Amino acid sequence: MGQLQNIQNWVVQNILNNPPIFLLLLVLMWPVVGMVIGRMSNWPRLMADFPDRDEAPVSQFSGQSGFMNQVRMNRVLKLGVCPSGLRIGIMRLFMPFARDFFVPWQAIRAIRKKSWSGATVELQFGNPAIGSLALPERVAERLANAGARFVMPSS
């Protein structure tokens, strides 16, 4: 117990009470945390399998929330409804190395689910699915009303 207390005291004295060092460590750790979150959400695989396209969105929804392969993305997602598919992006601040990816409509399957947080629609990408995005039902309905061509499952 004494050694742990010594380590805690050293961290407080040398890092937390030293703003320049604390900021340097924060700046160095932030991209690492973003890469871990990206891996957990399967973002790199989705970027590789569904590269972004140069297609203007019909509607864009920024600051959206959802679960990407069980990773909570709270108000950081950008969803773009395009004529031939759905563009999904994230605020660069949270995953600095992530690029948008573009999933064609024919590669999206929608499944209605109930969860502790309410009704959701899970969009599965690929066949077989290599990733998913669970959105609140109201967001999925907004996408469908904006021209999304995935089939909204009945209640």
Image (cartoon, helix red, strand yellow):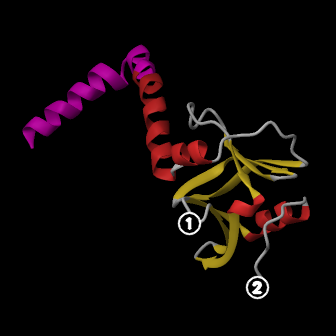
The CA distance from mark 1 to mark 2 is 24 Å
Which one is nearer the viewer's eye here, 93 or 56? Answer: 56
Which one is nearer the viewer's eye here, 62 or 111? Answer: 111
Q: Which residue appears farthest toward the top when viewing the image?
A: 20
Kind of element beneath mark 1? loop
Which one is nearer the viewer's eye here, 73 or 82? Answer: 82
Does the stretch in magenta take in 13?
Answer: yes
Q: How many marks?
A: 2
Q: Which residue is mark 1?
A: 128
Query: Which disc, if any, is residue 155?
Result: 2
Magenta residue span = 1-24
Residue 11, x across and y down, in percent: 26, 27
- What secondary structure is the magenta-colored segment mainly? helix
Query: Which disc, if any, is residue 148?
Result: none
Task: Kindly identify the residue that appears in the image at 51 percent across and 50 percent down.
Answer: 42
Where 107 falls versus 32 (above or below)?
below
Q: Specify the quadrant of the image occupied by residue 16.
A: top left
Q: Which residue appears farthest toward the left when viewing the image?
A: 2
Q: Amino acid at mark 2?
A: Ser
Kind of element beneath mark 2? loop
> Label 1: few (<14), some or many (≥20) within 10 Å?
few
